[in-house]
Image (tube, helix red, strand yellow):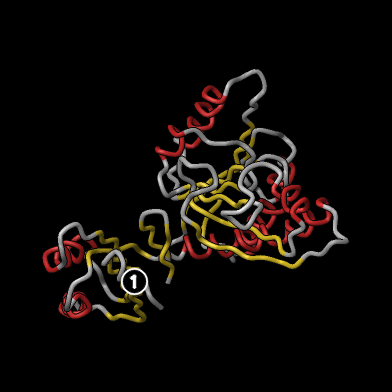
Amino acid sequence: MYKYVLKIKCSDAKGLIYKISNVLYKNDLNIEKNSEYVDSENKKFFFRARLDGTIDTQKIIDELQLTMPENTKITLTKKVKKQIVVLATKETHCLGDILLKHDSGELNADVLCVVSNHEELKLLCEKFGIKYHFVSNQNSDREEHEKKVLEILEKYKLDFIVLAKYMRILSQNFVSKYEQKIINIHHSFLPAFIGANPYKQAYKRGVKIIGATAHFVNNNLDEGPIIAQDVIGVNHEQSWKDMQKAGKNVEKTVLSNALDLVFDDKIFVHKNKTVIF
């Protein structure tokens, strides 16, 4: 069973696989599986390998940097559970799915706590023994509310923040503190029907499929790098509320799939796109 994941992103050049393999071989490391991709348009090379062996992480990174092109980004991480904080509002389906998988050991992450701007989900979290932070947004502006949330987050050594139907728009300041560490589930097949009430928009357009999109959060609303998507069929007999109900199953499935990819270190972010192995 592999113990480490090596990820490399750099400019494309000849002999990169040979150079990487040579460094790993000299350090007596076994490659259990590797994947690579060349983005010909942008002349970028992406490489991911699962490694087994005894590793001096910084030594391997330094040796690889000496052989690779300039501006190469290398990460070598031990296979351990990620530490996450979940932000939620009132809806239970995505949060409940995360808590169930966490409780059964299916989630490759530890849920450190749940933070919410409402109290409705407190009992659910208590059933699973998860610490719950309620931060009211009544009688406070966004800046004041976010300051309180950030004060809570700073108490935890977290790897990722999961927005499990957290129905508040995050400020640029908030996002910048956790760049490429915030994962959101959006109730629509992006980039279509961006913003509020996508099911109403879809209903009025007479769509034949609805979907959900999990993405990293950036400073453009619902326009961050896409991690996972899926759709289901609908028809003219369904109201927008029927679509909303059916869409909840898609949302929790898409979010679950996205979290598996993120927590297993399978994703590269390049510009506003993802490369996933």
Task: Name the residue that disc number 1 marks.
Answer: 48
Residue 104 picture location, percent across and down: 64, 64
The residue lying furthest to the top in this view is: 139
Residue 9 position by quadrant = bottom left
Residue kind at label 1, given as amino acid type: Arg
Say which of 87 and 68 sits in front: 68
Q: In this view, does 204 lie above or below 36?
A: above
In the displayed structure, 101 sits above or below 28; it is above
Q: In this view, does 112 lie to the left or right of 272?
A: right
Residue farthest left in this picture? 66
Most extreme residue toward the front, as rendered? 205
- Foreground: 97 or 55? 97
Query: Seen in the image, is 239 located left or right of residue 189?
Result: right
Residue 226 in the figure: left or right of residue 176: right
Work out which quarter of the rendered image holds the N terminus and state it. Answer: bottom left
Q: In which quarter of the image is residue 229?
A: bottom right
Position of 139 with respect to 72 (left or right) is right
At which x and y percent is residue 32? 35, 81
Q: Quadrant of the C terminus?
A: bottom left
Residue 28 position within the rendered picture, expressed as x and y whole percent measured from the top left:
20, 79
Q: Estimate how packed mark 1 is, as few (under 14), some (14 to 19) or many (20 or more) residues with alpha carbons within 10 Å.
A: many
Which residue is at 75% across, 38% downward? 120
Q: Is mark 1 on a helix, strand or loop?
A: strand
Image point 26% across, 61% down: which residue?
74
Q: Residue at x 30, y 80 (%)?
A: 31
Figure check: 218 above or below 239: above
Give coordinates of residue 226: x percent, y percent.
50, 58
Q: In this view, does 46 lie above or below 88?
A: below
Total labels drawn: 1
